[in-house]
Image (cartoon, rainbow, N blue to C red):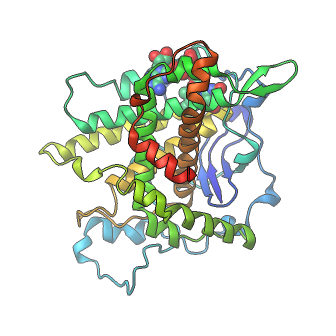
Amino acid sequence: MLVRFQLAAKENKLKGVHWKFSNTEGGAVKLWCDCPFWPDDGMCRLRDCSVCECPENEFPETFKKPSKVLTKEDLMCQEENPQATVDRTLDKKVFKGWVEVDNPWTNDDETDNSEMTYVNLQLNPERYTGYTGPSARRIWDAIYSENCPKYASGEMCQEKKVLYKLISGLHASISVHIAADYLLDEKANQWGQNFEILHDRVLRYPERVRNLYFTFLFVLRAVTKASDYLEQAEYDTGNHEDDLKTESLLEQMLYNPKLRAACPLPFDEAKLWQGQSGPELKLQIQKQFRNISALMDCVGCEKCRLWGKLQVLGLGTALKTLFSAGSDNKSSPPLQLQRNEVIALVNLLNRLSESVKFVHEMGPAGQKMVGHVSEPRSQEPSLLHRILQSVSGS
Ligand SMILES: Cc1cc2nc3c(=O)[nH]c(=O)nc-3n(C[C@H](O)[C@H](O)[C@H](O)COP(=O)(O)OP(=O)(O)OC[C@H]3O[C@@H](n4cnc5c(N)ncnc54)[C@H](O)[C@@H]3O)c2cc1C
C-alpha cells in the first residue's frame, strides 16, 4: 500500500512525499513542511538521514486519480446532525470509499494534496541516522515539557496519563529501532545491533518498556476496533497480486484466533472521558496532540521526519478511531479513514510490534552483554507475554 506525506523543506525543493509500503499502504503525508516553532536547523549527519523518493512511474494510477473519494461536504450532514441523516445502508458495509476529511487529532491538513510525492518505505528503513544532539533534544523537550508532561505520581486522571504513555512508548520504540539497526562502523559501513543503546535508553527504565507495551496494545485495540473498515477498504494499487496479498495478510492479522483469544480487549477506551469534564479534557488533549504533530515538521533529519510523521499520524488515527468516531455514543460520526491514515496505522502497529519483539527476544541477552543483570521477568506485563507467545505459536 502507499501513503503520501509532505516531506520536503523548501531548500530541498521537495514539497510532498508519498510513502510506499508493500501494499497495505496507500495515502499521503506532508513530510517537509516548515517548522511553525523555530527556524529549520537540519542536522543530518549521515547520508542515511535523507529520503529517496519514488520515481513518477512507480506511482499507482489509482492513487493519482482517486475515483470515489468522499469529501468533507459529503460527511458534513452526518457529522453535524446525525439524527437528520437517512441511513441508506442496506448491509454491514462500513467502508464507503476513501475519505478526504481532516483528522482532528493531527496538525496537517490531510485534504491538501498539492505537491506531494511518494517514498518507498522499504528503501528508507527506520534506523540509526546520526540525528542527535541539541536539535533532536529540542524536539523531545518541547514534546514532553509543553505538550505531555509526565504525570505526577498521585495523578488519578487516566486521560492525562494516556498521552504521556503513548508518546513515551513511541519514543521507546524509536530508540529500539535505532539500537536494532545501528551503524557500528562508519568507515566499513557495517550495520548491526547496539545493545548498549538498547539498555541505556530503554531497558534500564522499566517504565519506558511498560509504555512501549501500552502503546502497542493501544494501537492494536484501534486496529481491531476498525476491523470491519480495514477488511472492507479497497487495497488497489493496480498490482493485482500485491493487492490480494495485502487483503489476505490484513485478514490474517485482524482475525487471528490466537491473538483474539489472548487479548480480547487490549485497551478499554470506554473507561475514558466519562467524568463531567470529559469533553473539555478531550479537547485539551486533542490540542496537545496536534501540537506534537506540528512539532514533527521541526525534526531536522529527513528520514526521522518521515518516520516521525508517519507514526504520529498512526497514533492520531488510533486516537481518532478510539475516541472520535464510530463509538457507541450515537453522536459521533461513523469511522471514515483516509488511505494515508490506514497506512500509517498499520505501519505503526508493525513498528511497535517489531520493537516489542526485539525487546522481548534481545532484552535479557542485551542486558548480559552490557554487563547488567536482567530486569526481573515480573516487570514485563504478563498479558504481553501471552500475546507474543500466542502470535509466535511458542
Ligand atoms: C520524531 C523523532 C524521530 C526520530 N527518529 C530517529 C531515527 O529514525 N533514527 C535516529 O537515529 N534518530 C532519530 N531521532 C533522534 C533520537 O530519537 C534521539 O533524539 C537521538 O538519538 C539522541 O538520543 P539521546 O540519548 O540524547 O536521548 P533522546 O532519545 O533524544 O531523549 C531525550 C530525553 O528524553 C527522555 N526520554 C528518552 N526516552 C524516553 C522515553 N521512552 N519516555 C520518556 N522519556 C524519555 C530522557 O530524559 C532523554 O534524556 C528522532 C528524533 C525525533 C524527535
- Residue 139 position (above or below residue 114): above
**As drawn, which residue projects farthest toward the bottom?**
90
- Residue 382 position (above or below residue 189): below
- Residue 382 position (above or below residue 98): above
Residue 210 position within the rendered picture, expressed as x and y whole percent measured from the top left: 41, 32
> Nearest the camera: 240 or 142?
240
Residue at image coords 56%, 65%: 252
Residue 85 position within the rendered picture, expressed as x and y whole percent measured from the top left: 28, 77
Image quadrant of ligand 1?
A: top right
Residue 167 can be seen, yes or no: no
**As drawn, which residue projects farthest toward the right?**
188
Residue at image coords 25%, 64%: 328
Q: Quadrant of residue 302?
A: top right
Quadrant location of the N terminus? bottom right
Residue at image coords 68%, 54%: 21
Residue 377 position within the rendered picture, expressed as x and y whole percent measured from the top left: 44, 29
Q: How many marks?
A: 0
Residue at image coords 71%, 41%: 14
In this rendering, would 83 be left or right of 130? left
In this rendering, would 127 be left or right of 78? right
**As drawn, which residue projects farthest toward the front?**
394
Residue 36 position within the rendered picture, expressed as x and y whole percent measured from the top left: 50, 31
> Nearest the camera: 232 or 88?
232
In this rendering, would 32 be left or right of 390? right
**As drawn, which residue projects farthest toward the left?**
276
Residue 374 can be seen, yes or no: yes
In this rendering, would 2 be left or right of 344? right
> Nearest the camera: 317 or 243?
243
